[in-house]
Image: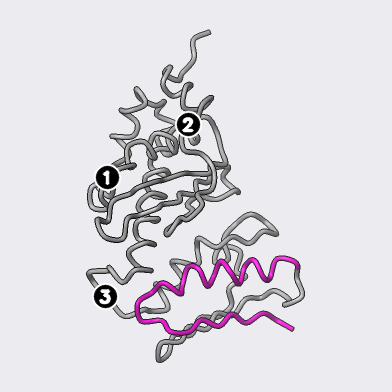
């Protein structure tokens, strides 16, 4: 029985390039959800003067296509400027692998989304955001959809663990319906702060758990 995957997909699956966490990374992002079985984390080391991606690595949790597309994305992006890397699209990634089964195209979309999110993370943390819109409750909620509730493997918003968001005078307060003594509380706090602190007009983030 012939494989639905190209030889290049299988090669990147069996021998992924640039895999693992990156020491000295100055940007990172994670997209996807363990609940649907696919996640990709991308780490960048960007030259602060040239804005060129000197190094890039990934961690992938998912199927062969997920691993292969994350791997090829790192090869396509390495050496490019942030503006050049941002233009990489899912079709370019899929074509570079010799094509993907239609049912697996979402994997290339996920890899591209992870790369673009990491670029966004770098730009936000280095004051490079060109369009500075005031932070809103809706924007905070959107970002918190990427923070997982480890109890069930879905995000805080979908599982209704997020009970309140207040944005006022540069301070963002997030209320989480989870005991402060819960084993996952510190990790959730850290992830919330990582998602919200880079916003240009946020000077303080407070995460409140139940007592």
Q: Colour scheme in the image?
A: one colour
Q: Position of residue 142 (x, y in %)?
A: 43, 67
Q: Which mark is residue 65?
A: 2
Real-space CA distance between mark 2 and mark 3, rounded to the nearest whole angstrom: 36 Å
Instruction: Decide which of tag 2 and tag 3 comes sooner along the chain.
Output: 2
Q: Position of residue 162 (x, y in %)?
A: 58, 73
Q: Image height check: is 93 above or below 202?
A: above
Instruction: Decide which of tag 1 and tag 3 comes sooner along the chain.
Output: 1
Q: Quadrant of residue 186?
A: bottom right
Q: Image height check: is 27 above or below 108?
A: below
> Which residue position is annotated with label 1?
80
- Residue at 59%, 77% in the rendered image: 163
Q: State the SS at label 3.
A: loop
Q: Is residue 100 left or right of residue 150?
A: left
- Residue at 41%, 43% in the rendered image: 111
* Of the two numbered discs 1 and 3 in the rendering, the one whose residue sits closer to the viewer: 1
The one nearer the camera, 80 or 206, is: 80
Q: Position of residue 119 (x, y in %)?
A: 35, 56
Q: Is residue 205 inside the magenta stretch? A: yes
- Residue found farthest to the top: 1
> Which residue position is annotated with label 3?
132
Q: Position of residue 43 (x, y in %)?
A: 45, 51
- Residue at 23%, 52% in the rendered image: 83
Q: State the SS at label 2.
A: helix
- Residue at 39%, 56% in the rendered image: 117
Question: Magenta span covers which residues?
Answer: 183-211
Q: Which mark is residue 59?
A: none
């Amino acid at each position: 029985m012939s494989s639905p995957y190209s030889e290049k997909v299988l090669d990147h699956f069996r021998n992924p390039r640039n895999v693992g966490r990156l020491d000295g990374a100055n940007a990172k992002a994670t997209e996807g959800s363990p609940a649907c079985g696919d996640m990709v984390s991308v780490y960048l080391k960007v030259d602060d003067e040239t804005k060129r991606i000197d190094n890039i690595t990934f961690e992938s949790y998912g199927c062969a296509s997920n691993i292969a597309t994350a791997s090829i994305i790192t090869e396509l992006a390495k050496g490019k400027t942030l503006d050049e890397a941002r233009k990489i699209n899912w079709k370019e990634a899929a074509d570079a692998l010799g094509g993907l089964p239609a049912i697996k195209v979402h994997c290339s979309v996920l890899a591209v989304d992870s790369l673009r999110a990491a670029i966004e993370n770098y730009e936000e943390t280095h004051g490079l955001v060109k369009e500075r819109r005031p932070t809103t409750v809706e924007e905070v909620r959107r970002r918190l959809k990427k923070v997982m509730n480890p109890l069930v493997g879905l995000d805080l918003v979908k599982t209704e663990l997020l009970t309140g968001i207040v944005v006022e005078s540069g301070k963002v307060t997030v209320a989480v319906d989870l005991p402060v003594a819960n084993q996952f509380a510190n990790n959730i706090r850290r992830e919330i702060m990582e998602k919200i602190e880079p916003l240009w007009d946020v000077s303080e983030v407070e995460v409140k758990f139940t007592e």
